[in-house]
Amino acid sequence: MPNQDPSTRRNFLKVAGSAAVLGAMSRVTLRPAEATPAMLNSAIRNIVGEAQVQTGRVKLEIPPLVENGNAVPMTVSVASPMTADDYVKSIHVFNEKNPQPYIGNFYLTPASGRAQVSTRIRLADSQKVVAIAQMSDGSFWSASVDVVVTLAACTEEL
């Protein structure tokens, strides 16, 4: 077995470990602790572009007052016949104050049967939740609900 200098190996491991820690720290500090209303509007514009977003046709069911933000039930339904000519292409859900403003997206087809999705989401604080549906004709419809959270989720410990 060749004789290796242990100090060279140790130095290499120290440098590699330091680089890994610095890389992880820069990732953590670059991300804001919570989204802002401007980030919410930007996330919505990334989906709809310059299209007009109309209110109606979308029903967002979420409790207006939740005790614990760790698992908030949410259902989004859209009034649509779900035929080959008239159906919901996608449903997008956004929030105002979580670390990321874009909660999720759901893609539908006429074979989906009905335009409804249910899930549980985490909410960092009292905030507005927005659901936007894209129809097959290219139009966008939305609904929003203000939710009061008494025990927040998504909090970062420093």
Image (tube, rainbow, N blue to C red):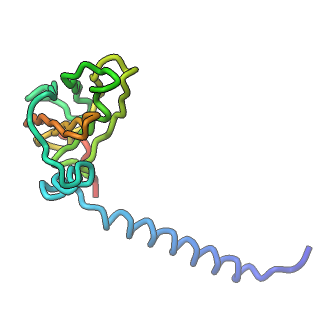
Q: Quadrant of the C terminus?
A: bottom left
From the viewer's side, name the closer residue of 71 and 49. 49
Q: Residue at x 25, y 36 (%)?
A: 137
For the image, the number of numbered tags is 0
User: Does residue 126 lie above or below 46 as drawn?
Assistant: above
Q: Decide if residue 110 is on the left or right side of residue 153.
A: right
From the viewer's side, name the closer residue of 71 and 102. 102
Q: Position of residue 148 (x, y in %)?
A: 8, 35
Q: Quadrant of the N terminus?
A: bottom right
Q: Residue at x 15, y 43 (%)?
A: 125
Q: Residue at x 35, y 24 (%)?
A: 84
Q: Residue at x 58, y 74 (%)?
A: 16
Q: Residue furthest front?
A: 85
Q: Decide if residue 153 is on the left or right side of residue 67.
A: right
Q: Position of residue 12 (x, y in %)?
A: 64, 78
User: Does residue 35 lie above or below 7 as drawn?
Assistant: above
Q: Please indicate, yes or no, whether residue 71 appears anywhere in the rendered image.
A: yes
Q: Please indicate, yes or no, whether residue 34 appears anywhere in the rendered image.
A: no
User: Does residue 140 lie above or below 100 as drawn?
Assistant: above
Q: Position of residue 21 (x, y in %)?
A: 47, 69
Q: Residue furthest right?
A: 1
